[in-house]
Amino acid sequence: MSTIVFIDTRGEKLPKAAQEAVTYASQLAGGSVTAVTFGDAAGLESLGAQGASKVIVARGVKAVDGQQLTKLVLDVAAKEGANTIVCVHDGTGKAVAPRLAAKLKAAHVAGALGLPDGDKFKRNVFSGKAQAWLQVTSPNKVISLMPNSIAIANNGGTATVEEYSGDLGAARITVKEVRKAGAGVPLPEAELVVSAGRGMKGPENWGMVEELAKELGAATACSRPVADMHWRPHHEHVGQTGVAIRPNLYIAIGISGAIQHLAGVNQSKVIVVINNDPEAPFFKAADYGIVGDAFQVLPKLVEAAKKLNAER
Amino acid sequence: MKILVLLSQVPDTTARIAFTNGNTQFDASGVTFIVNPYDEWYALVRALELKEAAGAGSVTTITVGGADTDATIRKGLAIGADEAVRVDAQPTEALQVAEQVAAYAKDKGFDLIIAGKETIDHNGGQVGGMVAELLDLPYVALASKLDVAAGKATIERDVPGGVEVVEAALPLVLSAAKGMAEQRIPNMRGIMAARTKPLTVVPAAATDNVAATASFELPPAKGAVKMIPADDAGKLIELLHTEAKVI
C-alpha cells in the first residue's frame, strides 16, 4: 500500500506547510509519493524536490468545500491504492482530514509532530502543556502534520503534473467574499514573530513594534486584551482562543504571560520576553529576558537589528 | 430551528497537568472539570442567540461520557439549553465520539450541529468534521460568525491572512471559534431551571476502534532564562544571531 499527500497550494508561491507535508509523506513512505491539490496553484513541478513524483491538481475547485475535496482525495487514494493520507493541520486540513478518516474508518492523527515510532504518533495535548503518543490500530491512516515540525527536503527532482478530470459534484459551500488582512507574512507560516501586549499603552505606539518586525523580517502578533480593545486586528491574536503558533523566535513585548497566552506560543523554539515587571510570569517560560521599559528597549533593538542587517 | 450542540467535559484551563499509571492516564485528582470553553462560550451561546432571535426552535446538547459528566452537562442547561443528551460511553478517541454523536443525530432532523473548534485537552478539532461526513452534511471549520436566514447560513471563517464569508444551505455542521458569541454566566433562575430540564441518557452505539492514547509525556523543563540588562538591549539581537541562531 502506498501513501498520498493532500495539500492546499493556492496562491502565488508554494506554502511552506505544503512542502513540509510532501517531505513528511515521502519520509513516511520511504520513497516518492503522489500529491493531490486544487485551485490555481503554480510551480507544482518543484514539489519533486520534496519527494513527489506526481502532482494531481483539480483546477476547477477554487475554494474549500470539504465534501468536494474529500471526494477528490478519496478518488486519488483509490486509484493509487493508498492506505495512508498525509494532510496539513491547518484550516484546509481541518475541513478535509476528519471527513477522510470518518469515511475510511481510519485513525486520524491531528497534528503529528514528527515521524512515528512504529504505529505511535506524537502530538500535542492540553494546549501544548503535554504530548501524547497515539497508537494507531486501523489499517487506513490519516495523518495531519503540524506546520513547522520538520525541515523541508530539497533533493532536486521534478514532479509530473496531471489535471484531475473526475466529477466532484457541485459545491455546497459558496464563498461570497474574502477579506484580506493586508500584506505581510501570515502568522501560522511565520518563522519569526514580534508580539506586543497592553504594555504598549495604546495602538498609536505600534510603529516601533512594526519597525522591529520589519528589520527582522518577522510577522506581528498581539495578546488577547489588545485584540479585544481593537488596538490590533483579531487575526493577530495569539493564545489559547486565538491562533496557536510555533515559530523559531517569539518576542513578547509588554505581555505578562497568562497561562492562556502561553498555550498559544509555548511551542516556539526561542522565546524572548521584554517587560518592565520583573515578576511577570512570562519570564519563567523565556529563553532570553529584558526587564525594562518597552519604549526605551525597542529603539535599541531596532538599531541593533539595522546594524546586523547592514553587516550581512 | 433545531440545533444540536456538542458539549465536552475538560479539565479547567488552570488545572495542573500530570499523569498516573506509568504516564498512561491523566491525573484527575484535585482537578476541577468544566464545559470545554469553545463548546460553551461560542457554540452553545450562539445556538441560544439564534433560537431567541427566531423566537422558536430548540437547543439540545450532546455529551459522550459517564455519569461523572452530569454536573458539567447541567451547566449547559443552566446557561439555557432546553434539553441534554448523554451517550453512556467513555470517550476514547475522536472517531468513536463522532460515531456516537452521528448515531444519535442521524434521524432527529437537526438544522444545525455546532461543535467547539477543539477541546482544550485533546486539541484535535476532529469530531465536527467526522460527524458531518457520517451524516453526509457540509461542514465549515473555524467559524467566527454565524447568521441564519431563510434556511441558509452565512458564516465567516478564519483563513490564513484574512477571513472568508461563505454561505451554505441548512442542515449544516460547523465548528465555532472565538468571535462567534460572548460567554454567558448562568443566573440563579437558570441554575434552578436546569435541575428539572430533561437529561436523557442513551445507550452507546457500536463504534469503530481505530486508535488509543498509549502514553503521555510532559515537555522537558525550560532552562534558566538569560537576562540582558535594559541599557545593553542591543546585545539581545547579537545573541539571537550568534548563540540562538534564529535570526
Image: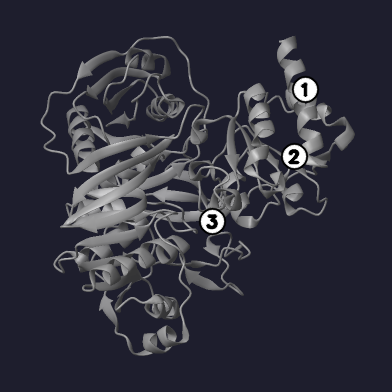
Question: Is residue A240 something one can see in this rendering?
Answer: yes
Is disc 1 surrounded by few (<14), some (14 to 19) or many (20+) residues within 10 Å?
A: some
Regarding mark 1 in the picture, which secondary structure is present there? helix
Name the residue that disc number 2 marks: A287
Q: Chain of mark 1?
A: A
Residue A287 vs residue B89, the one in the foreground: A287
Left or right, A203 with respect to A78, comes to right
**Residue B74, position in %: x, y?**
40, 80
For discs 3 and 2, the disc positioned in front in the rendered view: 2
Q: Residue at coordinates 32% horizontally, 71% vertically from top-left?
A: B61
Q: Are marks 2 and 1 on the same chain?
A: yes
Q: Mark 3 packing: few (<14 Cα in 10 Å), some, or many (20+)?
A: some
**Can you name the residue that lies furthest to the front here?**
A204
Residue kind at label 1, given as amino acid type: Glu
Residue A109 location, x and y as percent? 40, 45
Tell me the CA gap for discs 2 and 1: 22 Å
* Res A51 → quadrant: top left
The reply, left or right, for residue A175 in relation to residue B126 is left
Within 10 Å of disc 2 (Cα), the crowding (few <14, some 14-19, many 20+) is: some
Q: Nearer the viewer, residue A196 or A20?
A: A196
- Residue A126 badge: 3
